Image (tube, coloured by chain):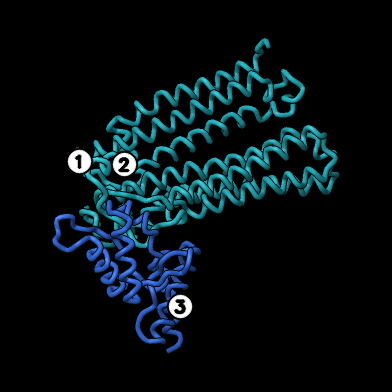
Amino acid sequence: MLLELDPESSVPPYEQLRRAVIDGVRDGTLVAGTRLPPVRTLAAELGLAANTVARAYRELERDDVIETRGRNGSFIAATGDATEQQAQLAASAYADRIAQLGLDAEQALTIVRAALQSRG
Amino acid sequence: MSLESPEWSLLGMLAVFVAIAAVTPLWMSRPSQIGRFARTVGLPLGGDVELERTIGARLRIRARWGALGMVVAAVVGVLLVLSGALTAQHEWGATAAPISGLALAGIVLTGRGIGTAISILPAPPEVQRHGARIARLPRPTVADYVAPIERIGARIFVGFGGLVAVAVVFLPAPAESRLLIGATAVTAIAALAGAEWVSSALVSRPQPAVSEQLLRWDDALRAQTLRDLVSVPLMAGGIVVVAAIFAFPDWPAFAGTVGHVIGSIVAYAVLIALIGVAVVSIAMEPARYYLKRLWPAQYAETQTPAYGSPAATPSAPSAEGA
């Protein structure tokens, strides 16, 4: 997912960033367990002050969109009901494993589809 | 000390490396070379003069830093040659003499790798002019830039070199040979650890970009740099094996008949595996691996359409990002 902020917009940059992350979660681009970059790194990439990114992260955390796991950083939180949360976490773990194995998304989806179909 | 033929040969080799280092930045600024790089990494320039100028500037910076690294490494090489540590001129250099050329090439390759790694540290010139605007979530990792065959291959190669070094310890080899093989194995392990640490540190740095197109090119340059770094432990692992063969030529006599047969089988198996890995690696286009992982739609456009399928029409790269 690409984040692109509009410097000419009347919407403040922290709000643009917050909305972009929420949109990413809603459309499934950012799945539960996805690690967000450190505040300073993202600030440097977007040409923003670190405080601006920190504010967006704080508000996303307040809304339970992201969660901070100590020194490990900030992650997209699992949303929805308990079943959906578990499904999202399982999908995230599967995606990590697929990346480790060097398979592409198409192969991963084919495998999942076959596994689901075999259960009828 | 008076220089003899082996020293002059090694100094000549270093002079060639320095000449290549001096010419490369000039060579890389030629439009034909920029186009060639674009084809290698699978990114079209599409006749965009401004883009070609921007990428040309990045390639020149990269080539200059790579050349500087090569020159600094060549100076280290000259000092090593003059000290007699790599030739039979002195007692301590006699054991290392058979691998001296390879060792110097390894040192120069390391210098080039460090130089190109430094070249991607500062923000690109266009970001310094216009400011950063675009970011990607989630952030890529080293595994997104370097193909497993190169990344894991380097570990296997260095691991094999380490095993060879351990095996030599158990054979009644001369002390100098054991010392040389041990030193090359330790160097290879240090090179692997160093390359992995530097690669990880480079990827975790911010990647400011002005546009999606330039972010894609930045990925291409990062991937090339990380591949340059991986080639250092790959070569270091090879030097351990060569050192074991040349510095300990009497190993069949020490190993006995069974050991000799096993050693020969292992040596041929390794050779065949290396050729196989090289062929597979080239066929898998490792220079475009990052494109496949990070920009799959763009990668698909670079692939030849299968027989019978509708021909792919060149189009502008679609919006994507990891």
**Mark 2: secondary structure:** loop
Please give the label number shown on residue A90.
Answer: 3
The residue mark sitting in front, 1 or 2, is 2
> Three-letter amino acid code at disc 1?
Gly
Chain of the residue on which disc 3 is drawn: A
User: Do marks 3 and 2 share a subunit?
Assistant: no
Indicate the position of residue A119 as horizontal and vertical percent values. Answer: 45, 87
Residue at 31 percent across and 46 percent down: it is B217
> Three-letter amino acid code at disc 3?
Ala
**Mark 3: secondary structure:** helix
Quadrant location, the N terminus of chain B: top right
Q: The cyan chain is which one?
A: B
Indicate the position of residue B178 as horizontal and vertical percent values. Answer: 77, 37
Per the rendering, the colour in which chain A appears is: blue
Quadrant location, the C terminus of chain B: bottom left
Answer whether residue B241 is visible to the viewer in this image. Answer: no
Indicate the position of residue A65 as horizontal and vertical percent values. Answer: 34, 74
Whether residue B145 is situated above or below residue B109 in the rendered picture? below
Camera-side residue of B2 and B125: B125
Q: In this view, does B33 lie to the left or right of A97?
A: left
Q: Can you tell which quarter of the image residue A61 is in?
A: bottom left
Residue on which the image places disc 1? B47
